[in-house]
Image (tube, grey):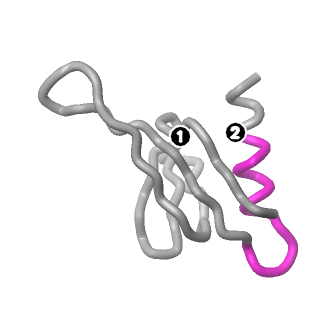
């Protein structure tokens, strides 16, 4: 259910009519040296989603792996 909700939010943000809404994406970044990791947030507009590589590209250039996303929020 959570994955379906995230997919719905992502589609909504990408297909919003007119100017795309600002979103805040919370995602998990695994630690490369040990078990665990940290949650990060990035805010802005989604430029596009590269379905082949599974990456969300933000307007400012940040790339977020879709499998690491835990939440997407928007005011709209």
* Residue 34 sits above or below residue 41 on the image: above
Q: Which residue reaches farthest left?
A: 33
Which percent across, then down, holds residue 7?
72, 40
Q: Are marks 2 and 1 in contact (CB under 8 Å)?
A: yes
Residue, x 56% and y 52% (percent of image)?
Answer: 25
* Residue 65 sits above or below residue 44 on the image: above
Instruction: Give whichever of discs 2 and 1 has the lower sequence position.
Output: 2
Disc 2 target residue: 6
Q: Is residue 74 left or right of residue 42?
A: right
* Quadrant position of residue 38: top left
Which percent across, then down, holds residue 71?
61, 41
Which percent across, then down, holds residue 10?
70, 50
Q: Secondary structure at mark 2?
A: helix
Q: Which residue reaches farthest right?
A: 17
Q: Which residue reaches farthest front?
A: 75
Disc 1 target residue: 69
Q: Quadrant of the C terminus?
A: bottom right
Q: Is residue 40 left or right of residue 16?
A: left
Residue, x 53% and y 55% (percent of image)?
Answer: 56
Q: Which mark is residue 55?
A: none
Label 2 – label 1 distance at C-alpha: 8 Å
């Amino acid at each position: 259910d959570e994955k379906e909700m995230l997919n719905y939010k992502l589609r909504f943000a990408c297909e919003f009519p007119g100017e795309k809404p600002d979103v805040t994406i919370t995602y998990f970044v695994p630690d490369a040296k040990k078990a665990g990791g940290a949650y990060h947030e990035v805010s802005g507009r989604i430029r596009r989603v590269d379905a082949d590589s599974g990456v969300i590209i933000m307007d400012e250039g940040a790339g977020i792996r879709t499998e690491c996303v835990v939440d997407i929020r928007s005011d709209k």
